[in-house]
């Protein structure tokens, strides 16, 4: 499953419950592995937060896509 939105996209009936379940599943998986995962930055972008993450290939495109989707969903309400 990629970032693109299908023309048949429908928000889940209970988006809140789905988001909580997906976050829980991810955190359970992340905490059960020894692989290095990116840290969640604690500094604002203006003070270097996210700079390490943003140096990764395609990071800027992924962030731009995420924000466009998030803002589009808000505008659709």
Image: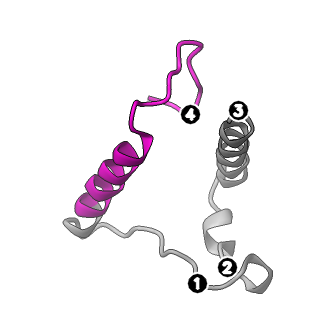
Q: Which is nearer the N-term, disc 2 or disc 1? A: 1
- Circle 2 sits on which residue? 49
Q: Which is nearer the N-term, disc 4 or disc 1? A: 4
Q: Which is nearer the N-term, disc 4 or disc 3? A: 4
Crowdedness of circle 4 by 10 Å Cα count: few (<14), some, many (20+)? Answer: few
Q: Which mark is residue 3?
A: 4
Query: Which residue is located at x 30 percent, y 66 percent?
Result: 35
Q: Which is nearer the N-term, disc 2 or disc 4? A: 4
Residue 19 inside the magenta-drawn segment = yes
CB atoms at circles 2 and 1 under 8 Å apart? yes
Q: Which residues are magenta?
A: 1-29
Establish if 7 lies above or below 70.
Answer: above
Q: Which is nearer the N-term, disc 3 or disc 2? A: 2
Q: Which mark is residue 62?
A: none
Query: Which residue is located at x 53 percent, y 13 percent?
Result: 8
Q: Which mark is residue 76?
A: 3
> Within the image, what quadrant is residue 73 found in?
top right
Query: Which residue is located at x 59 percent, y 27 percent?
Result: 4
Q: Position of residue 16 (x, y in %)?
A: 42, 47
Give the quarter of the figure containing the C terminus: top right
- For marks 3 and 1, give the CA distance: 31 Å
């Amino acid at each position: 499953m990629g970032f693109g939105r299908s023309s048949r996209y429908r928000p889940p009936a209970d988006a809140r419950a789905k988001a909580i379940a997906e976050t829980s599943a991810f955190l359970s998986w992340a905490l059960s592995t020894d692989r290095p995962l990116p840290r969640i930055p604690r500094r604002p972008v203006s003070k270097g937060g996210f700079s390490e993450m943003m140096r990764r290939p395609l990071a800027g495109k992924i962030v731009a896509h995420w924000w466009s989707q998030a803002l589009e969903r808000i505008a659709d309400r």
